[in-house]
Image (tube, rainbow, N blue to C red):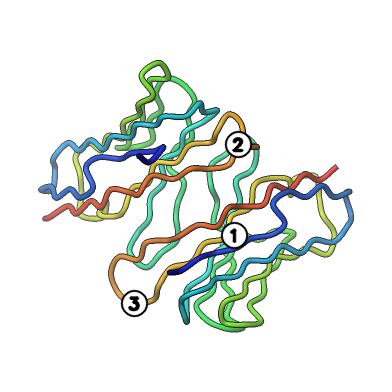
């Protein structure tokens, strides 16, 4: 079993829909990251959080440390949100090395 | 199968010293290659990417440089390290082509500049 699990693996939405991507992890962490990868591009860091909730524009990330779970929400989705969204965690031990989820491929149709 | 190697795993260097981090990929040809940094308390940041030998694109102007002397070798360098260069450095590769390109990350190098 992977230490970082994301769901769903693939997601197709209509423009304007509210989107949720989930991430669960099984190791002790010091921080959790949400990353975005556009087709043919590099990875962009969206959020880093260790507790609570963060908001940036139409993106909201939450984390529940007790439940070892995080969600990424996109409100009023737009075709330009189409990308792969990756959850990654810093281990609390092992020098804080990053462990990545496999990503969620999001396609937003106009 | 493809594998990606980075070394060293951990490095402690004094301020003002040079740096050379190496990344190599096995099992694939003509990959795109990437260097990322995760500074303490911050998210991942793309530093450089390369689509071929000798072709380097810099995303963020800074104290670092990158080179790609061979198809599957990517080197991150600095002539004089700064304290702010401390962080976790990740190399990644992806296949070329249109559409979705999953990036595969190396194990990382943790750099501490003192």
Q: Residue at x 89, y 54 (%)?
A: B16
Location of residue B73 (image quadrant)? bottom right
Q: What residue did someone put label 3 on?
A: B97
Residue B47 shows which numbered tag?
1
What's the distance in space between the residues labelled 1 and 3, CA to CA?
A: 21 Å
Q: Residue at x 54, y 74 (%)?
A: B50
Nearer the N terminus, badge 1 or badge 3?
Answer: 1
> Left or right of B81: which side holds B99?
left
> Left or right of B35: which side holds B111?
right
> Left or right of A4: which side holds B48?
right
The percent coordinates of residue A101 (x first, y second) are: 38, 44
Q: What residue did someone put label 2 on?
A: A96
Q: Residue at x 29, y 37 (%)?
A: A58
Residues behind callouts 1 and 2 on a single chain: no
Asked if the residues shown at circle 1 and circle 2 are in contact, with their CB atoms under 8 angstroms apart, the answer is: no
Nearer to us of marks 1 and 2 is 2
């Amino acid at each position: 079993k992977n230490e970082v699990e994301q769901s769903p693996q693939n997601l197709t939405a209509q423009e304007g829909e509210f989107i949720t991507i989930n991430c669960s992890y099984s190791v002790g962490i010091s921080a959790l990251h949400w990353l975005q990868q556009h087709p043919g591009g590099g990875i962009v860091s969206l959020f880093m959080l260790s507790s609570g909730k963060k908001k940036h524009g139409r993106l909201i990330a939450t984390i529940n440390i007790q439940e070892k779970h995080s969600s990424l929400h996109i409100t009023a989705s737009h075709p330009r949100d189409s990308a792969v969204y990756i959850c990654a965690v810093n281990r609390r031990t092992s020098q804080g090395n990053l462990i990545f989820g496999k990503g969620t491929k999001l396609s937003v149709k106009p | 199968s493809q594998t990606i190697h980075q070394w060293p795993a951990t490095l402690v260097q004094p301020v003002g010293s040079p740096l050379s981090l190496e990344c190599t990929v096995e099992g694939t040809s003509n990959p795109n290659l990437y260097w990322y940094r995760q500074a303490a308390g911050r998210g991942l940041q793309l530093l450089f990417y390369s689509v071929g030998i000798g072709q380097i694109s810099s995303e963020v102007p800074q104290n670092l440089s990158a080179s790609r002397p061979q198809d599957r070798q990517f080197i991150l360098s600095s002539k004089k390290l700064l304290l702010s260069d401390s962080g976790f450095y990740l190399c990644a590769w992806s296949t070329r082509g249109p559409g979705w390109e999953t990036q595969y990350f190396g194990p990382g190098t943790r750099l501490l500049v003192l």
